[in-house]
């Protein structure tokens, strides 16, 4: 059995039960990684190719002119960029 430690309080938390991610609700899935993951998706904006940046829950965050700039913006905010097609 492993012991979880709350990073904010340094207190031990009760052991967590394993979770099958195939059975997460839509709301649980949306919250998963919401503050650590951003999705980068190619879009058309005014007829030009651009890259939309969305939070893990789908909230629009920004639009960048190219993919590298979008990924750099995500990384600058200490998030993990995930490309979506």
Image (tube, rainbow, N blue to C red):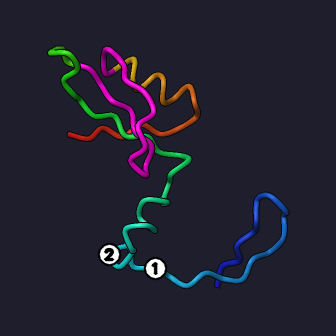
Q: Which residue is mark 2?
A: 22
- Quarter holding residue 82: top left
Considering the numbered disc 2 on the image, is that residue within a helix, a strand or a loop? helix
Q: Is residue 24 above or below residue 77?
A: below
Mark 1 neighbour density, 10 Å: few (under 14) some (14–19) many (20 or more): few
Q: Nearer the viewer, residue 6 or 58?
A: 58
Residue drawn at the location 42% of the way across and 27% of the way down: 62
Residue drawn at the location 32% of the way across and 75% of the way down: 22
- Quarter holding residue 83: top left
Residue 65 in percent (x, y) is at 32, 14
Q: Is residue 68 magenta?
A: no
Q: Nearer the viewer, residue 77 or 62?
A: 62
Q: Which residue is mark 1?
A: 19
Residue drawn at the location 64% of the way across and 85% of the way down: 1
Give the extent of the magenta segment. Answer: 50-67
Left or right: 43 as drawn, with respect to 33: left
Left or right: 34 as drawn, with respect to 15: left
Left or right: 25 as drawn, with respect to 51: right
Residue 6 in percent (x, y) is at 76, 66
**Alpha carbons under labels 2 and 1: distance apart:** 9 Å
Left or right: 25 as drawn, with respect to 47: right
Residue 34 in percent (x, y) is at 51, 51
Residue drawn at the location 18% of the way across and 14% of the way down: 48
Considering the numbered disc 1 on the image, is that residue within a helix, a strand or a loop? loop
Q: Is residue 55 magenta?
A: yes
Residue 31 in percent (x, y) is at 49, 60
**Majority secondary structure of the magenta segment?**
strand
């Amino acid at each position: 059995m492993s012991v979880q430690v709350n990073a904010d309080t340094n207190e031990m938390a009760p052991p967590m039960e394993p979770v099958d991610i195939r059975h997460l609700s839509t709301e649980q899935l949306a919250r998963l990684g919401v503050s650590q993951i951003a999705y980068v998706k190619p879009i058309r904006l005014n007829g030009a190719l651009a890259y939309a940046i969305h939070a893990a829950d789908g909230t629009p965050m920004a639009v960048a002119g190219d993919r590298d700039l979008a990924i750099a913006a995500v990384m600058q905010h200490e998030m993990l960029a995930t490309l979506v097609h």
